[in-house]
Each structure stands twice: as structure tokens, then as C-alpha cells.
Image (tube, rainbow, N blue to C red):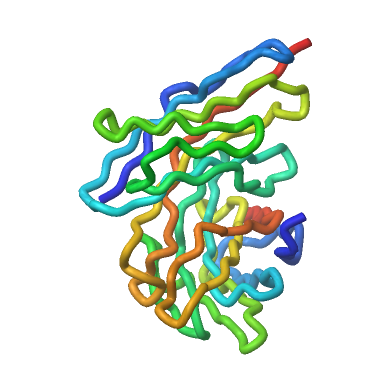
Amino acid sequence: ETGVTQSPTHLIKTRGQQVTLRCSSQSGHNTVSWYQQALGQGPQFIFQYYREEENGRGNFPPRFSGLQFPNYSSELNVNALELDDSALYLCASSPMLGAEGFLSYEQYFGPGTRLTVT
Amino acid sequence: AQKITQTQPGMFVQEKEAVTLDCTYDTSDPSYGLFWYKQPSSGEMIFLIYQGSYDQQNATEGRYSLNFQKARKSANLVISASQLGDSAMYFCAMREEGKGLTGGGNKLTFGTGTQLKVEL
């Protein structure tokens, strides 16, 4: 059991609408990453948050935005939804070890939110 | 840019047999990590095993081992004594390392996956 939770489980939206997906990190984890997984593909990195700031972004347009809260939970917001945004959205949390910010290899994924845009 | 290639869209294996899932990678980074994840039909990505580029020995975790051949840029996953519960999608992934979190260094680049089916 990873301890990362996501809500909602499934969501259906109409093209042009806006959506907010939520992620609760595993206890003790202070970084969160979001991924988009289209059907039949591997996950694609959207962005990463650490200490409530975005500090890494993949090849996604600005209408994909996020937030990280002081309790390390996170939101992914997508504006002006397009049909191609239909996918499984995964969040992953990981701990940071040590004052130097040594990366742990542990990255635990939540069960995902399946978004369908019609 | 990093790239992961998984050339086996689907694999079948008999229960209790061993199976090797192929993964090749391409990167110009001197320091990187290689991961394997299992994704059942429920959708959750389950971490299986990790190999650092400077690790001298191949990683092992229970029935999982990673056959790391740096010169060939391959990181194949070996599952021994396959079980019916091993049926799932398997993804190979890579991460740049050495840049720290402030450099966005937790990004994983995934391959397209291999669907493994374990048969009786």
C-alpha cells in the first residue's frame, strides 16, 4: 500500500471546461509529480512541485497548472479541456533526504484519475 | 534528451517459468537511474526495482532482478518463478540524477510498456 490517494477516481468533462484533480501525498513525502498517461502509452511527465513551487515541467502547455499546499497535498488544474486531454492522470510523491536534497529513488504513485473529455 | 525503448508489446510466460522483459535506453547524462514499474489493470504504478548508473552490481528485489549492461545501454527486467498475479503492464523508466530536486530532477521518462500474461 503506497499511501498516495487521488480524487476523483473518474471524471467526465466537456471540451472547453476546466478540471481540478487532487492528490494527497504519502506521509513524510514533500515532493509531488504529475503524469499524464494516454491509452496504450507510458506516462508523460507534466510537472513537479517541491516546497509549494514548480521546479520542473514537461512538454505541456500553460493551461496545465498546479498547486502544492503546506501539507504537501497537490492539485492539477487543466483549463480549456481538449479531447486529447482524455487520459489517466497519475500523481507520485517522494521524500527528500538530507539537507542537500539528496534524491530518494522512492517514488510512489497513486491509483490515478481517469479523465474523459467529450 | 532521454529515451526509453521497450520493443515487446506483449509477452506470454508459463507459470513458474522465468521471463525477461527488454528495455534499452538513450541518454547523454553521466548519472542516471533506471526503474521498473508494474501497472495492473487498476492503473496504479507499483515500483519494482531500481538501478543506479554507477552501481557495480545488478539490482535484485525478491523475484525481480535487473540485468544492467551499461555498454549496451540495456536494463532488462528478469522475473523468476512467474505467478498468475504477475500478469500486468510493465514499464521501464529513467531519471536524470545528480541535479537535485531544485533542478527538477525527479522526472521519470517512461517507455511504452510490455503487457505480460502469465498462463497456467
Q: Quadrant of residue B19?
A: top right
In percent of width and height, residue B117 lies at: 67, 20
On the picture, is B2 further left or further right than A9? Answer: left
Front-most of residues A15 and B93 = B93
Residue lying furthest left? B28
In percent of width and height, residue B92 lies at: 48, 39
- Is residue A113 visible to us here? no
In percent of width and height, residue A99 lies at: 45, 82
In percent of width and height, residue A113 lies at: 68, 58
Q: Quadrant of the C terminus of chain B?
A: top right
- In the rendered picture of this protein, how many numbered marks are placed on residues? 0
Q: Quadrant of residue A31?
A: bottom right
Taking the spot 51% from the left edge, 73% from the top edge, the residue there is A97
On the picture, is A13 further left or further right than B20? Answer: right
Q: Is residue B38 above or below residue A74?
A: above
Taking the spot 70% from the left edge, 38% from the top edge, the residue there is B40
Q: Is residue A43 above or below residue A78?
A: above
Taking the spot 57% from the left edge, 70% from the top edge, the residue there is A95
- Is residue A49 visible to us here? yes
Q: Is residue A94 above or below residue B16?
A: below
